[in-house]
Amino acid sequence: MTREQFEELVSQALDRIPPELTRLMDNVAVFVEDEPDPGDPDLLGLYEGTPLTERGEWYAGVLPDRITVYRGPTLRMCETQEDVVAETEITVVHEIAHHFGIDDERLHALGYG
C-alpha cells in the first residue's frame, strides 16, 4: 500500500469520528509517518501533547498536540487490506482518545488495545 493510500485511510478514519467529538478536539494535528523511532519498531501510533483533561488556564500559545500514525508497522502486522483498514481506524481512535485524556488501560478494556 502506498503512502498516499495509507494517508487516505487515516483521513477516512478521522472522518468517521462523530462530529460531536471532533468539535471538542482542540489544537491537535494528525500526521502519517513511515516508521516510528527504531527503539519501538512495532508502534502503530503515538500521541504527543497535553490531553484536554489536563489543560488549565496556563494552556495558551503552545504548539499543537501531535498524533502520528505509522504506516510500516501497520502494514507488517496486517495480512489483508481489510485488516489494514480496521487497524488504522483502531489506531486513530486510540490516539484521539489519548487527546481526550483516556489512558491505555481504559482503551484496552474498550477493545482499542
Image: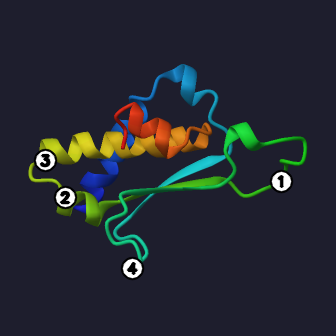
Mark 1 and mark 4: span between their CA atoms? 31 Å
The residue where tag 3 is placed is 81
User: Could you tell me which residue is drawn at 37 percent across and 63 percent down?
Assistant: 43
Residue 95 image position (x, y, % from top left): 48, 46
Tag 3, which secondary structure? helix
Residue 82 image position (x, y, % from top left): 14, 41
Tag 4, which secondary structure? loop
Residue 40 vertical placement versus 54 (above, below)? below
Q: Amino acid at mark 1?
A: Gly
Tell me the quadrant of the picture where the N terminus can be found.
bottom left
Of all residues, the one furthest to the top in this rendering is 20
Could you tell me if the residues under marks 3 and 1 are in contact, i.e. CB atoms within 8 Å? no
Mark 3 and mark 2: span between their CA atoms? 11 Å
Closer to us: 71 or 7: 71
In the displayed structure image, the side of residue 60 where residue 80 appears, left or right:
left
Mark 2 and mark 4: span between their CA atoms? 16 Å
Q: Nearer the viewer, mark 4 or mark 3?
A: 4
- Mark 1 is surrounded, within 10 Å at the Cα level, by few (under 14), some (14 to 19) or many (20 or more) other residues, namely few
Q: Earlier in the sequence, mark 2 or mark 4?
A: 4
Q: Earlier in the sequence, mark 1 or mark 4?
A: 4
Q: Amino acid at mark 4?
A: Pro
Of all residues, the one furthest to the right in this rendering is 57
The residue where tag 4 is placed is 38
User: Could you tell me which residue is drawn at 41 percent across and 43 percent down?
Assistant: 92
Q: Nearer the viewer, mark 2 or mark 1?
A: 2
Q: Nearer the viewer, mark 3 or mark 2?
A: 2
Residue 78 vertical placement versus 107 (above, below)? below
Mark 3 and mark 1: span between their CA atoms? 40 Å
Mark 2 and mark 1: span between their CA atoms? 38 Å
Q: Which of the 4 image quadrants contains residue 9?
A: top left
The residue where tag 2 is placed is 77
User: Could you tell me which residue is drawn at 40 percent across and 39 percent down?
Assistant: 108
